[in-house]
Amino acid sequence: MAIVQQPNGRWKADIEPIKGKRFRKTFKTKGEAQRFEASCRTKLIETPDWSPKPKDRRRLSELAELYHVLHGHSLADSVRLKQVLAQLVRDLGNPVAVVFTADQFCKLRGDYLAAGVHGKTLNNRLGYLKSMFNELNRLGAIDYPNPLAKVRPLRLQERPLSYLTHDQIAELLAAFDSYPDCEHLALIARVCLATGARWGEAQGLTPDRVKNGAVVFANTKSKRTRSIPIHPELEKALLGYFKRNGLFPNCIRHFSRVLNTTSIRLPAGQATHVLRHTFASHFVMAGGNILALQKVLGHSSVTMTMRYAHLAPEHLKEALRLNPIFDTFSTPTGAGN
């Protein structure tokens, strides 16, 4: 940084307040050049963008904590999400975030798979990390791109959805009705079977959300409130329970205990969700409209609801009528010879 008098008597200010930012200007007097230098120094202080940014040395754990403070706390099940991210960070070795690479995540994912962690769980964890980087970038908390942007989720074999037959429904409800001191279990199960609600949605019902022949589900997974009609007898039973006992207790753990007393065996990981699948499956098999089912279940996309489409009577009839050997069954063997 220098102020030098030129051969013509004028004064030249040649100023480089930070590396890569250089300013040159010529003045009539030395005082003007000095004031220009001072103004550059002042601007450097008042405008931090002039200063070179220090290297971002924050580790993944710091970003995970920042993500929770800025955004994660507003998400459903934010406590569990914070715990999952913290465990991921530990398993990754808590590297400096700016040098974290997709290769590091993919290597850990391979280790998880070898240890028997389910692919869907790993896809969820990838989604959590991607969301963290995307949201922090959107908020300006980081200024580098998402290192996992090009990492694809694992392709998973779709599992058939289990649902209960009419006989199994009767057996399960009988088991709930006979389970000691658990009137609430039987009621919640009936709400799930009658409306397609998730167990948590049915368990969270309050008296003011049971009225006019319908139940209203709020605080749902899709963040949308929905109202579903119910039978008058179920409405009466719900209001009677609330009047006698207050709100439903948290009882999802008791579902498996009751289920184990029956002859019903479900695939791993379905548990209470079988009630929702049962409602949807019987709805479609009885000829219900798939778009109406989407609204009842509260799916944000019809793609999720289409999992039940193969159960529609029309779908099944077409599979029977349009298969390539259908005509062979209607023509006796040896006919025409």
Image (cartoon, rainbow, N blue to C red):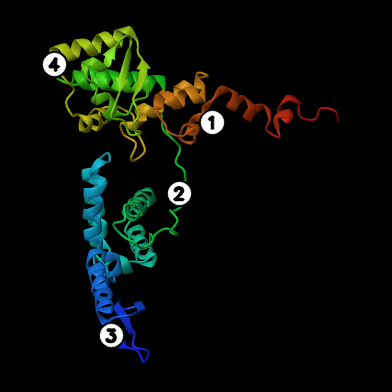
Q: Which amino acid lies under the numbered mark 3 shown in the image of this protein?
A: Ala
Q: CA distance from mark 3 to mark 4?
A: 84 Å
Disc number placed over residue 156 in the picture, else none: 2
- Callout in the foreground (2, 3): 3
Identity of the residue drawn at 63% across and 30% down: 319
CB-based contact (under 8 Å), mark 4 and mark 2:
no
Instruction: Report helix, strand or loop for mark 1.
Output: helix
Residue 236 place in picture, x, y as percent: 26, 8
Identity of the residue drawn at 28% across and 64% down: 92
Counting residues from the start of the chain, the first of labels 1 and 2 encountered is: 2
Q: CA distance from mark 1 to mark 3?
A: 80 Å
Counting residues from the start of the chain, the first of labels 4 and 2 encountered is: 2
Where is 157 relative to 264, above or below? below
Quadrant into which the C terminus falls: top right
Q: Please give the residue where the numbered disc 1 appears in the rendered image.
A: 310
Are there few (<14), some (14-19), or many (20+) residues within 10 Å of tag 1?
some
Disc number placed over residue 268 in the picture, else none: none
Residue 10 place in picture, x, y as percent: 34, 85
CB-based contact (under 8 Å), mark 1 and mark 3:
no
